[in-house]
Amino acid sequence: MADGNGCFKAQILAVAILVSTYPNMIHAQSASPAQQPLLVAAGSLRQAMDDILRAYQEKGGQRFEVRYGPSGNLRKEIEMGLKVDAFASASVDHTEALAAAKLLGPSKEFTHNDLCIVSRTRLAADTSGLLRSLSVPALRLATSTPVADPMGDYTWQFFRNAERSQPGIYQLLDTKALKLSGSAAPAAGNKPPYVTAFEQNQADAYVMYCTNAVATAKAVPGLHTVRIPDELNVPGAYGISAHSSSAEGEALVRFVLSRDGQAILEQYGFH
């Protein structure tokens, strides 16, 4: 028994010496395989960013794990400790705030998106006609959720812009708006909430990004799309930032800003 204890102690001593002498080797042998770099991105970027990531890999870049969701919620997760290699937000305000807090590196504005309205019946394209249509009490107007999702923030700015053209309409639109998206990311495999809203007869009109409007109109036959007039529209400025310690994240940001990355975004209606 004494001999067994002595042998066990000798083994423990040998392991301790090995760990202190070759710590990196021990860590490499015991650690799980290296995780893929993580990109979190606005849900409105899903199709374009999937194509960008494929093109990035074809150019020799590493494969990224990617998670889409409302940008405001993703920002909160990063502020609460989520470690990401890159963040592509539908609002440059979020990436600038994270850069200022030293949670991410410099923020870069990389694309823009406008607001459109998709509806069951054709809406007027001019300012007064459009606001008159939206003011109809029976019209169910769907929106995204402010704060959680920049598309909701841009929509409420559109309401404020409308107030300047037609006093009193802000309160009307703010009250009637149905926040049907933006509070959380759709579950994997689910249809976009904009499509579901029309298929399940939850709304008569929906304020959304023009890029989403194209996909929604394709998915649900018979819908109509109108771009909100310039004097009321709120072009969304998208921001992207990498973690300062992630070379792969910084490489992806450079690719998104490159001619190849920008060309893919333009194919999906970004500008």
Image: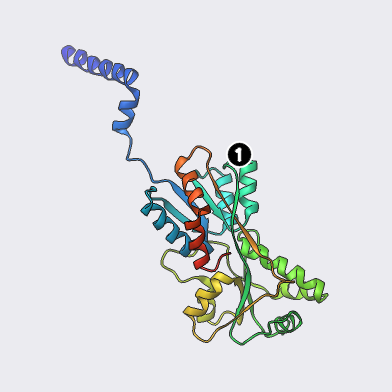
The quadrant in which the C terminus is found is bottom right
Nearest the viewer among 177 and 121 is 121
Position of residue 216 in the picture relative to residue 229 (left or right): left
Mark 1 burial class by Cα count in 10 Å: few <14, some 14-19, many 20+: few
Above or below, comparing residue 114 to residue 13 in the picture: below
Above or below, comparing residue 139 to residue 261 in the picture: below
Residue 132 place in picture, x, y as percent:
74, 84
The quadrant in which the N terminus is found is top left
Q: How many marks?
A: 1
Nearest the viewer among 271 and 121 is 271
**Residue that appears at 72% across and 81% down:** 126
Residue 68 place in picture, x, y as percent:
49, 58
Which residue type carries mark 1? Answer: Lys
Position of residue 104 in the picture relative to residue 234 (left or right): left
Position of residue 217 in the picture relative to residue 65 (left or right): right
**Residue that appears at 36% across and 54% down:** 58
Q: What's the image's color scheme?
A: rainbow
**Quadrant position of residue 15:** top left
Residue at mark 1: 102
Furthest residue to the right?
Answer: 167
**Residue that appears at 62% across and 64% down:** 151
Above or below, comparing residue 133 to residue 80 in the picture: below
Residue 122 place in picture, x, y as percent:
62, 87
Above or below, comparing residue 252 to residue 202 in the picture: above
Residue 65 place in picture, x, y as percent:
41, 51
Q: Secondary structure at mark 1?
A: loop
Nearest the viewer among 63 and 18 is 63
